[in-house]
Amino acid sequence: MKKNTLIILGHPDKDSFCGALARAYVEGARQAGIEIKEIEIGSIKFDPVLWRGYKEIQELEPDLVKAQKLILQTSCFCGYFSGHF
């Protein structure tokens, strides 16, 4: 059974070094026969704010729900993730 894998590029610039690493991972995974989906945080409308706190359930991105394996690719600035993460 193929693992349903999701890779999330958290760097806002898909042409960055992080983007190149993510593309290389995707290419290798596909060559190995792994089913993989890509999300580029910088190219989607993404609102991480819980506007109603924990009073209401905020639905997850459908691909996050289906993923059996999750790869997070982002840069690290002075020990912290990109603001998009």
Image (cartoon, rainbow, N blue to C red):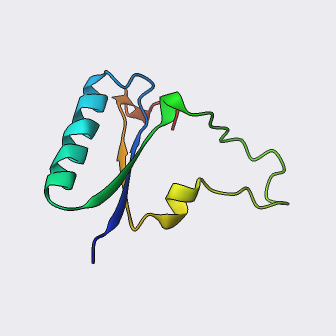
The residue at the point 44 percent across, 63 percent down is 67
Q: Position of residue 71 (x, y in %)?
A: 34, 52
Residue 45 in view: yes
Vertically, is 15 above or below 56?
above
Q: Position of residue 53 (x, y in %)?
A: 80, 52
Find residue 56 and report its image quarter: bottom right
The residue at the point 33 percent across, 55 percent down is 36
Q: Is residue 16 left or right of residue 13?
A: left
Q: Position of residue 4 (x, y in %)?
A: 36, 65
For the image, the number of numbered tags is 0
Find residue 78 and report its image quarter: top left
Residue 83 in view: no
Q: Camera-side residue: 80 or 20?
A: 20
Q: Is residue 68 left or right of residue 30?
A: right
Find residue 14 and report its image quarter: top left
Q: Camera-side residue: 10 or 62?
A: 62
The residue at the point 62 percent across, 33 percent down is 45
